[in-house]
Amino acid sequence: MDLWVKDFVERAIEYIQEMGYDPLYKDFYDFETTLISNLVYVKGFVKNLSVKGLSSLNIDSVSYNILFGRLDLDLVLNAVQLEVEHYEAEGRYGNRGGWGDLSGTLEISQLRIVVDTLLRVTPGQPAYIININTDITLGDIQADFKANWKCLSCLAPRDISSCVNNILNVRVKEIWATYKNELNTLVAEGIREVVNRWWW
């Protein structure tokens, strides 16, 4: 089982690289969508976007106890770097909305998931998760963005760079800590659902 997990992670890394997701470059991408007719509308574009590190997965440890059916896994995404030269979007919600632009860099490091799982493994049958616990931790976020926002009724855009950077550098980690148990439960149940329904 531990060899299967290692092989699965290696294949996932190969897939990410072969599909061109790491590194990922977009010279220009525009979008336009109406989420709710005549109510919610969003359009914009991104120029010179690069994302690196999506395949920087590493198994720090994995072990399987065949007697008790317990699988322990420590998986870490080492570092993901995002850089965008220019992002611009306009959104409307009824008669409200505004326009914003953003440029800069973002780095997420040491995103780790530790899993202990109780499996039922029967020869010739798919594995079935009886119980699973996850512990997801985030090492650090370093955001350095320049951002502006202009509401529909405003005469000029306002610099919101410090607000955006504070949310990403400080508030995200505070929210993460506050809702850690809920996040772990959500991810654990998601893994259980995927494996028990689709793994055969």
Image: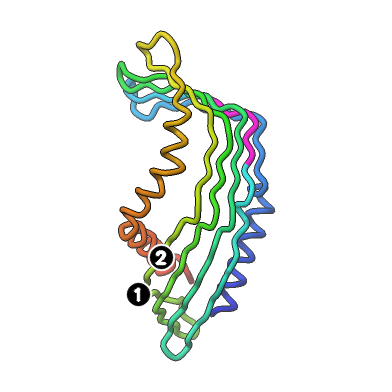
Identify the residue shown where x is 44% and y is 70%.
115
Q: Give the image location of residue 97, x and y in percent.
A: 36, 20
Q: Which residue is drawn at 37% across and 52% down?
A: 176
In this orientation, which residue lies closer to the viewer: 174 or 77?
A: 174
Residue 7, quarter of the rendered image: bottom right
According to the picture, the residue beneath numbered tag 2 turns out to be 135
Q: In this view, does 56 lie above or below 90?
A: below
Q: Label 2: how many residues lie within 10 Å, few (<14), some (14-19) or many (20+)?
A: some
Quarter location, residue 189: bottom left
Q: Nearer the viewer, residue 179 or 64?
A: 179
In this view, the mark in front (1 or 2): 2
The answer to whether residue 99 of the structure is visible from this angle is no
Q: Is residue 81 magenta?
A: no
Q: Indicate left or right for 97 with 53 as reference.
A: left
The residue nearer to you, when weighing 184 against 158, is: 158
Residue 152 horizontal side relative to residue 123, left or right: left
* Mark 1–mark 2 distance (CA, rounded to whole Å): 14 Å
In this image, 159 relative to 35: left or right? right
Tell me the magenta residue range.
45-50
Q: Is 168 positioned to the left or the right of 144 in the image? A: left
Looking at the image, residue 129 lies above or below residue 89: below
Q: What element carries label 1?
A: strand
Which element is circle 2 on? strand
Vertical position of residue 103 compared to residue 166: above or below: above
Q: Which amino acid does label 2 sit on?
A: Asp
Residue at left offset 42%, top offset 74%: 116
Residue tagged 1: 131
Across and down, in percent, residue 180 comes to 34, 57
The mark found on residue 110 in the picture is none
Q: How many marks?
A: 2
